[in-house]
Image (cartoon, grey):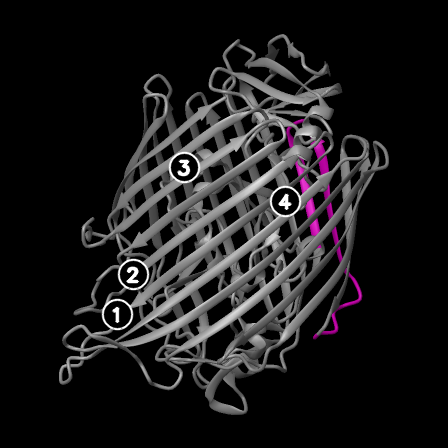
Amino acid sequence: MLVISRLLAQEGNGTVEGRVLSKSGKPVSDATIFLQNTVHGTQTSSEGLFALSAPSGDYALVVRTIGSEDAQVKITVKAGESLKIEDIKLSETPLALNEVVITGQSEPQSLRNSVYQVRTIDSERIRLRGATNLQTILNTELGIRFSNDLTLGTSDIQLMGMSGQGVKILLDGIPMVDRGGTRESLGQIDINTIERIEIVEGPMSVMYGTDALAGVINIITKKGHDGASLTVNARIQEETAGDEYDALTKKGTHNQGLGLTWQNEHLQFNGNVTRNNFGGWQGASTGRAKAWMPKDQMLYTAGTRFTGKRWNVWYRFNGTDETIKYLGNRNEYTGEAGDQDYITKRWFHQVQSEIRPNDKLHITAVGSYTDYSRRTLSTNVDINDRRTLSLEPGSQDKSIFTTAFFRGTAFYKAGDHLSILGGVDFSNNNASGARINGSPTINEYALFVAPEIRFGQFFKLTPGLRFLKNSVYDAPPVIPSLNGKLTLSKSLDFRFGYARGFRSPALRELYFDFHDASHSINGNVNLKAEYSNSFNSFLVWQAVSREGLRVSSTLGGFYNVFHDLIDTGIDPNDRTQTTYLNIHLFKTTGVSLDNKLFWKNLQATLGATYIGRYNEFSEAPEDFGSLPEFVWSTEINANLLYTFKKAGASINLFYKFSGKRPVYESADQVNIHLAETEGFHMADLTVSKTLGKYVNLLGGVKNLFDVTNLQNTSTDTGGAHSTGGAVPMSFGRSYFLGLSFQWTKH
């Protein structure tokens, strides 16, 4: 501490204070304030006020908020002095989307300037959903679908027609570890720590490597702001599971969270603990069994950050302790029941640092270590409720996956027309357990470079190359990409992109054998790596017809071709077994339209997608007749958020229609059958009200249309993951009520 105190004294900070106003003179809240080319920044209060501290020196202070032009003020900070600057008035801009994004970028920049098409979900929208997990937030987003495995109590995601193994999940830019293709990690992130979510559609293999074929979902956590402060956050929420609820017997969903952040000009410490308890849902099941299994989840986060004049370093720990309970029915003759606990522990350590030696160079380094385990604990319960361990073969199991990851990048601004981003990646993946053959290890090394070339103010081009070495697979010598943005007018942009994708098989797909009553799958050490070629384009129109009204519209299209796609199928060497196989050809294509409107106190969005998935039987018309190359499904979503500012209240509707999902299938490779999963409507209605200065009340109805199981005409009742029978989607209409508390002392 003595060393730190000396450092603080040597740097000699001053403070900057001011106020941000709109063109009409009203305070602007939640505007981002930062000193250009430094790590110092903050946000404005509800009165438009801000204050931050920084070492002595000359700076450019930048003010940025959605729907306004950036404002920039030259300032001089002197040690030990407070600088009060004049009110900053913002000018409204025809650019309705001026928010800052970081995913895939060389450094944080406005959404308008990015060559990638990035979707964002901000903290206010996250809060208004009343969510206790990420699935609740993402389930009404265009192009995103979830599937539920009720036997294991897990959910998986699909993005733009591609399943979870092709979707990269990042936490503050660092990959999350999963056992295999199922993205369980989405359900193991503390919702109370999330600042925003960024979604990039299309392959990002050059920037983020394997598993980024379909796109990237980057969850960005709260980092705090400059200035000395103490903040306490608390949240409690109660929710029914369909029509089932009882606080004493743990029926329904019960969420409690507590967080604490302390910081001064250079140091920050924070911690958060959240409990999610779900009592399951009986549904059509009888006896002890439940259609949706109970889950008890503890989520822990802790972190610290140290900030210097041109550098910072922070450490963050994320812990998950989760138990999913399968309750078996009693044998009518013996009275004995068999239970299983699926116990997951995830310890995720992150370290990140950045330094800006000068205004042209920005260097970052990130490292992480993940220790992930999933244990199956099987027990027998007799008629007197005495519990003993099951002695059945394979009934006790534990699988362990560890990953060490490092990523270093350097960004150099060579001039107004050229900047260069380069970096290195390294990952070490290990697995062990009774169901894993041996103790396999996969190492991957990568070098990537992505220069950004600017042709005046109207055209920006970003080619990229990734050089890859995989310890198990012969990766392609280079993975290329090309992204560009053409500014057609002040309110019209055109983005386009091409990327080569690559995904090496995961350890689970190679070495993991899994057999139970509902699953039967063997790993396949002979799998090939996946390759893809992907194209996308977006036309973005943004305009303001008058003050207070902003409209934007985005028309997009994509086309993806995959070779040797990894999926499950019947083992050709043993028709009684299921294994992982390479599908020599698979395609997805589609179009999307997304419209946004901001008018006074109203925010509204309306969008649609039309997505096609490849029909493999169309390749052989001589065997199966003339069949379409693609089978298509439709999605439509709408969000309406209206704020009553004087009352401190809002009413919010989140809606999505997912059309029927067709697929051609054959049980004998002779007869073809068109199967369909029925379409459904999903909607949440929430109401928010402030209670005094520190408390907010949020309540509402989730799953307004009372969706539970979807009808499915598939005849596939075998395989690793059976697709026959009803498809579980939700446990029906539920009601929730919650309180959140935030107190800050500066």
- Is 6 left, or right, of 728 in this rendering? right
| Alpha carbons under labels 1 and 4: distance apart | 42 Å
Where residue 541 appears, as percent x and y from the top left, is 60, 33
Which residue is denoted by mark 1 in the rendering? 327
The residue under the point 60% across, 77% down is: 582
In which quarter of the view is residue 225 placed?
Answer: top right
Q: Earlier in the sequence, mark 3 or mark 1?
A: 3
Please tell me the numbered disc located at residue 103: 4
- Is 268 left, or right, of 713 in this rendering? right
Question: Tag 1: residue type?
Answer: Leu
At label 2, counting other C-alpha atoms closer than 10 Å, the crowd grade (few under 14, some 14-19, many 20 or more) is: many
Question: Tag 2: residue type?
Answer: Pro
| Alpha carbons under labels 3 and 1: distance apart | 33 Å
Query: Split into 4 quadrants, where in the image is the N terminus?
Result: top right
For label 3, the SS is: helix
Q: Which residues are magenta?
A: 472-498
| Alpha carbons under labels 1 and 2: distance apart | 9 Å
At label 4, counting other C-alpha atoms closer than 10 Å, the crowd grade (few under 14, some 14-19, many 20 or more) is: many
For label 4, the SS is: loop
